[in-house]
Amino acid sequence: MAPITMIEGIRQAMFEEMDRDPAVVAIGEDIGVYGGAFKATEGLLAKFGRERVIETPISETAIVGAACGMGFLGLRPVAEMQFIDFIACCFNQVTNFVAKSHYLWGAPVPMVIRGPSGGGVHGGPFHSANPEMYFVHTPGLKIIYPSTPSDAKGLLKSAIRDNNPVLFFEHKFLYRRIKEEVPEGDHLVPIGKAIVRREGTDLTIISYAAMAHTSMEAAEQLAKEGIEAEVIDLRTLLPLDRETILTSVKKTNKLLIVHEDTRTGGIAGEIAAIVCEGAFEDLDGPIARVTGLDTPVPYAPTLEERFLPNTEKIVAAARELAKY
Amino acid sequence: MSNPLTREQHLELYYFMQLNRQLEERMVRLFRQNKIVGGLYSSLGQEAVSVGSCYPLEKKDWIAPMIRNVGALLVKGVPPRDIFTQHMAKYTSPTQGKDGTSHFGDLKVRHIVSPISMLGDLIPVMTGVAMAGRYLGQNIVALTWIGDGGSSTGAFHEGLNLAAQQRAPFVLIVENNQWAYSTPVSRQVPVKNLADRAVAYGIRSWIVDGNDVLAVYNASKEAVDECRAGRGPALIEVKTMRMRGHAQHDPAEYVPKQMFDYWKARDPITLYEKYLTENKIWDSKAKAEIDARIERELDVEQKFAEDSPMPPPELAEEGVYCDGCHEIEAAWQRPKAEVMPPRCSIEPGWQVKDYGSYAEVEAITKQIAAPVVAGGGNGSKVAKPVVKSGGKPPQKQQPRLAEPETPDIPRVPFGRGPKDKSVRETQNPRDRHQNPRDKRGRR
Ligand SMILES: Cc1ncc(C[n+]2csc(CCOP(=O)(O)OP(=O)(O)O)c2C)c(N)n1
Ligand SMILES: [Mg+2]
């Protein structure tokens, strides 16, 4: 199979799932005739028609609310946020209606909300956000943030088949920058399982999304200096794969966490707590983190570069940690 | 108030309204005995709204109640014990004690979506229910309620607009009970009739006497029929009155006494009793029988609730995710092949009816009659969307001055960079604008 981009992986997942199950429908702004702001749904309308590719007014609350209602009748809607930043507009629907339904009254909501996320493309403060942690803090949701085309495809397919509401973050920097061969056939990737992208012995770097790639680059650079980093790509942020995290830390005894999201309240803090609870005795050094700044994502390239973690910052932090 | 209902149906309407009232009166007593865990809301004086609007629905139709729609739950077949146990946070309640009030639902049998406290959010959700029902070929109608206060939320607008754009089989009952907590309706919205909102969505609307159960029933029946025939959505404003405070804790001293008096004279149950008597639909014996039946039933249901246990503490940890505990299976009432390729495939693209110019609007407006106003009472006049020209043709625009004003406003440094710091340290803040780097003015 020819290598494909991440956006193509997402598109294929949509086509395959809609072909497989008539309960799967797509809903969002400009997703039909135009094919979505990033063309993730291109061609969907022609193949599946207006009943299944529902183009809505600019109403995020209505999109998520309606998708939730459809879920109650057994449909499996996939709602698109044109940019994930706009999920703030329907925060209430997501956190109070969708996330709590099963716990409170036993009503599963089998829906997916997906959307382009993250920075690095000079989108500015309202088109670059990584709002995952608002939702990681919301019981009832599952949160996925893949870093490769095959994971994006396999995880989106799993998300659509899941009985729970899944938030599916797509890093737009990765949409067309990487290509990969995706396994043939009905390719599913399990939700809730991290993956070790690179084996190492000296320290563990945990990351996800675009920063998983940056961490891999840093690891290669560190290897030249004789530091062997193990790199874990979380892929799912909720529920977190504690086992993979703890197994790796017990092996390398040092932990560096890297995320693009802002620092305070980022997932690094949660992982640090997990490691303190489950592998404190195994630690040979302080848990380190490289993260986005505690600021909005600024617009100017010079400012955004300052905001974002990069290879140099990760290498520098890893070097310090390796000294312990 | 003439209508095609049978005698049994007439009596059933009374039964549900009285059951609604007596059930809530009992809960007030339980509240005073500290047996209700949280707050207690009352629908006293609004029973005709809940019962009359839910009554035309079929078993397959969907509702989502608000806190003052206990009557609708009863009409939908919810046993009173569910309402008692919910309020008392009992393990036997529909949510097993995880939530209270009317916050519970039933996906499989009675087709009820549980509300959440955030007002307005049911509107988009029930729009989705209506859309999904249509998609599955079920020919259902989805109905929910919103208060006069809740009609100001963004979700109300987004949901109703989507419902209208989708022509969803969705009925919205706007329960104008004159008050939103302590705020009168006139201080919430700048329109007299909330039904006027419907014009903005291009949908049909009714204004109904909410204390006249048959008027509510008739309008709702018509709205439900319209939606089922594919001409949804529909909005019904009912004029009624909240006869108690917002909840039990609130003595409602802000409500003028005369206002209570006015509405007390229009009590929906008293009015309906009078109607049944005057029209010889019942006699005092029939009434006594129904009233006794209600007491009997409520005795049993209340005892069940009082005798029920609280949930075991460990339940708190269960049920966040559906881990295969539910089978999700849509109830298809049409061939799936209709929505699968190749049958569902289309030639994508938009058809645009006109080009949207001012000139076109002007031409169309000349052919349209004056605006139609929504009717009241049992009537069902239609509010048609009206194209307005805005009166006069627009004045010829004065050419705008090409040169924007560029006042020499200092750019106040707000970063913490080294330069800004030096500015702060070396200069009196008042002189800051004289710094050459600030001469650039604002971005
Ligand atoms: C979005 C939102 N804001 C505030 C509240 C708090 N609140 C609960 S009921 C209520 C008044 C509601 O008035 P109305 O919609 O007219 O309904 P009524 O109580 O009169 O039936 C308020 C402010 C809420 N539940 N939801
Ligand atoms: Mg009110």
Image (cartoon, coloured by chain):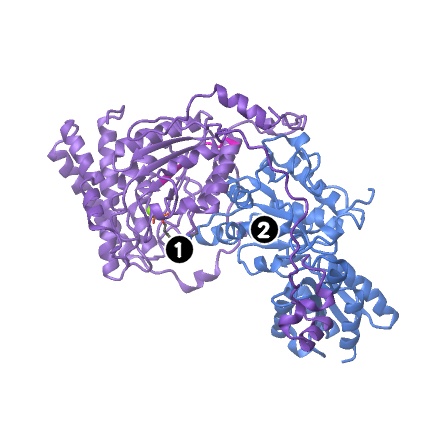
Chain colours: A blue, B purple
Dot 2 alpha-carbon crowd within 10 angstroms: few under 14, some 14 to 19, many 20 or more:
many
User: Is residue B168 located in the magenta-colored stretch of the structure?
Assistant: yes
Q: Mark 2 lies on which chain?
A: A
Subunit under mark 1: B
Q: Where is residue A312 in the image (x, y as percent from the top left)?
A: 80, 68
Quadrant in the picture for residue A250: bottom right
Q: Considering only vertical position in the picture, is A16 above or below B345? A: below
Label ID, residue B160: none
The reply to whether residue B332 is in sight is no
Is label 2 in a helix, a strand or a loop? Answer: helix
Q: Is residue A80 above or below residue B273?
A: below
**Residue B28's quadrant in the figure?**
bottom left
Determine the residue positioned at 51% across, 34% down: B131
Q: Is residue B39 magenta?
A: no
Q: In this view, does A31 lie to the left or right of B263?
A: right
- Check the image and report above or below for A7 versus A201: above
Residue B381 left/right relative to B436: left
- Residue B356 lies in what quarter of the image? top right
Look at discs 2 and 1 and give the one toward the viewer.
2
Frontmost residue, A186 versus A293: A293
Tag 1: amino acid: Asp
Q: Please, what is the three-letter code of the amino acid marked with disc 2?
A: Ile
Residue furthest top as drawn: B367
Instruction: State the residue position of label 1.
Output: B99
Q: How far apart are marks 2 and 1 (CA)?
A: 26 Å
Q: Residues within 10 Å of mark 1 (few under 14, many from 20)?
A: many
Residue extending furthest right? A224
Give the residue drawn at x 48%, y 41%: B157
Helix, strand or loop status at disc 1: loop
The stretch in magenta equals: B166-174
- Residue A87, disc: 2
The N terminus of chain A - image quarter? top right
